[in-house]
Amino acid sequence: MPRPVWSGAVSFGLVMIPIKVLPATENHNIAFHQVHLEDMGRVRTRKVCEIDGQELSQDQIGKGYEISKDTLVEVTDEELDSMPLPTARAIEIVAFVAADSIDPVRVGDGYYLAAEGVAAKPYKLLRMALERSSKVAVAKFAWHNRERLGLLRVKEDTIVLHAMRWDDEVRSPAELAPREVDLSDEEVDAAIQLLETMACDDISDMTDGYREAVEEMLAAKAEHREPRPVGGEAPEPTGEVVDLMAALNASVEKAKAGRGEHTGDDATLHDLPKRRAAKTTANKKASTKTAAKKTTAKKTTAKKTTSGKTAKKTAGRKRSA
């Protein structure tokens, strides 16, 4: 585990739980240096005053706030430290809410809370209370001279703290909503079937294909060889408007093939859409009625013809007599 980044206590009503805060995640991104392409010399970033052009050291640099164009006021660390911050050394739980009531957009990086000293019992008490209630805790805490909103939840036997955005820090997506379109029941059903085909209970085997390819490229450069192919190539976007149902059907077939399931012509989502099936049934009924009418008409005509012939024969016999 990495070194703690913060220490204090979780305030749970009148219960205080001393804890240490440790990063729950780590960054595996590959970092690059800026270099001079001509001689591969490192390019450094220097902090220079834009007024006198002097290069500054860190102890010569302070904070300033722009109150208007070209007007800055100095703000010192001492002034910020003197600001009232009740949660300076505590994670104060202020509410317990249902987990699904939290907008995921507001949830940030995660940190593990480790119990310190005699905190094992109250720590377990809070963890079990969260587990049995199926709720999460919303808390306030201070970090880097700023009060933040936090979310406490349970992961296995550990309590996890997530930094959260305040409500006014989340932009509204209203203006990004797509225009109104019509969707058929068949298209929605097809999308749901694709969702179910791609459903997965465990994503632990997913890997970062891009990072793996970059690592292979760097290893090949160090060993003066050609890099081995890693992963598959992403399809190029064509920009073409495709038939939505055909694309959904093809996606389901591809997902099934990826899982090793049987695919074929008999596995299509909709061999006959409901509306088309209804029309076909109606057409069959209409055809049956029409055929019945024609048959009845033929029978009636045949009866009339037979009656006419019988009448003619009877009349001929009377004349002969």
Image (cartoon, rainbow, N blue to C red):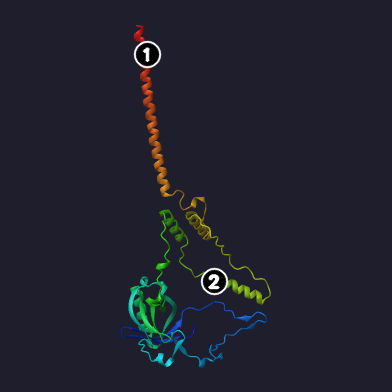
Q: Nearer the viewer, residue 226 or 77?
A: 77
Foreground: disc 1 or disc 2: 1
Q: Nearer the viewer, residue 271 or 34?
A: 34
**Residue at the extreme right of the image, as rendered:** 224
Up/down of 294 relative to 31, above or below = above
User: Amino acid type of disc 2?
Assistant: Asp
Dot 2: what SS? loop
Q: Is residue 138 left or right of residue 257?
A: left
Up/down of 41 relative to 188, above or below = below
User: Amino acid type of disc 1?
Assistant: Lys
| Image location of residue 208, percent across then percent down | 54, 71
Up/down of 46 relative to 250, above or below = below
Dot 1: what SS? helix
The C terminus lies in which quarter of the figure?
top left
Label 1 to label 2: alpha-carbon separation: 98 Å
| Image location of residue 139, percent across then percent down | 36, 80
Residue drawn 60% across and 73% down? 214
| Image location of residue 301, percent across then percent down | 38, 25
Q: Nearer the viewer, residue 209 or 58?
A: 58
The answer to which of marks 1 and 2 sits earlier in the sequence is 2
Is residue 215 in view?
yes
Q: Residues within 10 Å of mark 1 (few under 14, many from 20)?
A: few
Residue 44 numbered tag? none
**Residue at the extreme top of the image, as rendered:** 321
Q: Residues within 10 Å of mark 2 (few under 14, many from 20)?
A: few
Q: Nearer the viewer, residue 189 or 167?
A: 167
Q: Which residue is mark 1?
A: 313
Q: How many marks?
A: 2
Q: Which residue is mark 2?
A: 208
| Image location of residue 76, percent across then percent down | 43, 92
Is residue 158 in view?
no
Residue drawn 41% across and 75% down? 107
